[in-house]
Amino acid sequence: MNGSEKENISGAKYPSLNTQNAAESLKITDISKAGYQLLKENKLNDAIDCFSRILLIDENNNYALVGMGDASRKAGIIRDALKYYQRCLENHPENNYALFGLADCYKAMNQYQKAIDIWEQYLLHDNKNITVLTRIADAYRKVKDFSNSKRTYQKVLEMEGNNAYAIIGLGHLHYDFKEYSMALFYWEKMLKSSANVTVDIRVLTSIGNCHRKLKTFSDGIPYFEAALQKDKNNFYALFGLADCYRGLSQTEKSLEYWNMILENDPKNKMILTRAGDAYRNLNDFEKAKSLYERALNIEFDTYAVMGLALLAKSQGKFDEALVSLKRLIQQDNKNYRLYIELADCYQKTGNKRTAVETLENFQKLGIKNQKIAEMLDNINNTKSNNKK
């Protein structure tokens, strides 16, 4: 009898403990490799089957627990993924893959501060991991911590000057805080660094959106058009073009793109009201009314009701418009546009005193608004001139 075998009482031979352990380890390694390959191929059920087989052999196997966590997270079963990563960390507290997965779970659950805490813990083991640093910066951006987000993105750029995630992240960060010129700076930098590679459509629409916010509509149009060349049905590109042409008062052109969106998404009530506004401005009142009513058939919408009120006003039906606008103000008393349209209605019926009172009622809310102030000045100046 050799050293690798023992005999039982009946004389049958079976492997020694050491040989059993070696065989099990080899089996686990093979199954683990197969599981991770299936995970890469997005064959999640087959991957889960592999990792489950390992856990029957070794219930605390770190590769299998992380694998189960990854597969569950990819399948969108975040609660299960959390349990597997936590179970792994209970037995293998230094496992960085489990830490990474756990943080991604909290991120997926919008629990960004928990994700940040875990990623910071990860950095104790690997403080120059660019992937983790950009994730931390993204999470700080989500919780609106501008300074920490910017600091972390810039730390990445110190390590890797043209890191796309950091540059795009800085663009989003400044955009979120309405610093559109700085957002434009970073996204244009991204565009220049991508000169010899395929440009991400999101970079193009982001630059276009900066121009929309800065009201440099003509400059935004080429970027949205370039995005449409990559995806002719891209919502953000179509919306951006429609809104840019609206900003340029090219109503017919804007309507062309609103209608293209509606072909793909006929129940989008925001677009229905925008298209209704365009038809109203083109004096196609029947079509405008039809679109506003389609929006209201989906659910109540302030702008659809306001559109119908403005339609009534355009047709000289001032009493109807006044009733609708006053009801809307009761429901949304901080919407300055409603006060402007209501005041304009009163002016058109020769009731300037009530127009002034309407605008003053808005100011009593303690909200400063330049358009309200300008309209109030115009009415008061007109009254003064008439007295002279």
Image (cartoon, rainbow, N blue to C red):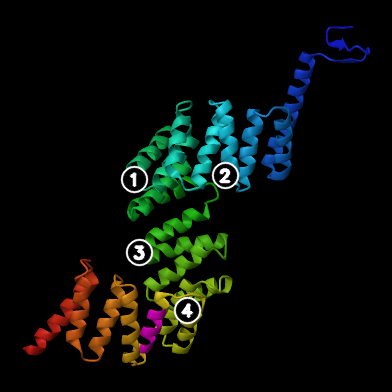
Quadrant where the N terminus sits is top right
> Which residue has dot 3 on it?
216
* Secondary structure of residue under mark 1: helix
- Report the mark closest to the observer, 4 or 2: 2
x then y, percent, for residue 324:
35, 84
Q: Is residue 327 above or below residue 171?
A: below
> Which residue has dot 1 on it?
146
x then y, percent, for residue 294:
51, 80
- Report the mark closest to the observer, 2 or 3: 2
Measured in 3D between alpha carbons, the distance from the residue under mark 3 to the one under mark 4, in whole angstroms, is 32 Å
Measured in 3D between alpha carbons, the distance from the residue under mark 2 to the one under mark 3, in whole angstroms, is 46 Å
Measured in 3D between alpha carbons, the distance from the residue under mark 3 to the one under mark 1, in whole angstroms, is 26 Å
Q: In this view, does 343 lie above or below 102?
A: below
Return the residue nearer the eye: 118 or 175.
118
* Residue 152 makes an appearance in the image: yes
Quadrant where the C terminus sits is bottom left
> Which residue has dot 2 on it?
79
